[in-house]
Image (cartoon, rainbow, N blue to C red):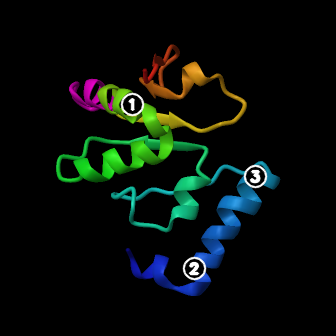
Amino acid sequence: MTDFAKSKDSLNLLNTLFTVYAHHYNCAVFNLVQSAFALPPVTRNNSTYIILMRSLSDAAQIKNLLVQQFGTKWRGAYQAYQEIMSKPFQAMLINNDPNSPPSMRILSHFTEEYPIAYDPL
C-alpha cells in the first residue's frame, strides 16, 4: 500500500470521494493504480467502473478481485479476462453501474462504438 493510502487524512479523502461525491453528487472519480489492491477496499467497493489491464505478475490479485466482484461466477469472469487479454493491447472493463443491464457487466473494446460484452456463466 502506498504512503498516500496509509495516511488517515488520505483515507478520509478517498472515502469521501468514493462514497459522497461519486454517489451523491454524480461525479466521476478516476483512480489509476497499477495494483488492484494498492488502495483500501472503499475505493474498489465503490468504483462504478474498474478497468483491468494485462498483469503477468499479479494473476492472484486479478482472481481475488474477480471473486470479490462476481462471487460464485468468478471463474466465468476469469475466463473472459483470459480471452480478452489473449489479444494485444486490450483491457477489460467491469461495469458496476447499478443502472446498467447485467449482460453489460464485463466489456472489452469499450472505447469503440460497439463494445463486446461477456457473460460470466
Q: Which badge, 1 or 3, comes first in the chain's sequence? A: 3
Q: Secondary structure at mark 1?
A: helix
* Few, some or many residues within 10 Å of mark 3 (<14, 14–19, 20+): some
User: Closer to the N terminus: mark 2 or mark 3?
Assistant: 2
Magenta residue check for 98: no
Mark drawn on residue 23: 3
Residue 89 counted in the magenta span: yes
Looking at the picture, tell me which residue is in the foreground, 72 or 94.
72
Give the mark toward the camera: 1 or 3: 1
- Which amino acid type is marked by label 3? His
Residue at 71%, 54% in the rendered image: 22
Please, what secondary structure does the residue beneath circle 3 have? helix
Q: Which residue is mark 2?
A: 10
Residue type for callout 2? Ser
- Say if 95 sits above or below 41 in the image: above
Left or right of 67? Residue 86 is left
Position of the C terminus, as image quadrant, is top left
Q: From the viewer's perspective, is residue 96 above or below residue 47? A: above
Q: CA distance from mark 2 to mark 3?
A: 19 Å
Q: Residue at x 58, y 63 (%)?
A: 42
Q: In the structure shown, which secondary structural element does the residue marked by tag 2 occupy?
A: helix
Tell me how far mark 1 sits from mark 2, CA to CA.
Answer: 32 Å
Q: Which residues are magenta?
A: 81-90
Say which quarter of the image contains residue 96: top right
Q: Quadrant of the N terminus?
A: bottom left
Q: Which residue is mark 1?
A: 77
Q: Quadrant of residue 43?
A: bottom right
* Vertical relation: 87 (above or below) 68: above
- In the picture shown, does residue 115 fall above or below 91? above
Task: Give the residue at x 47% y 28%.
Answer: 106
Left or right: where 89 falls relative to 17: left
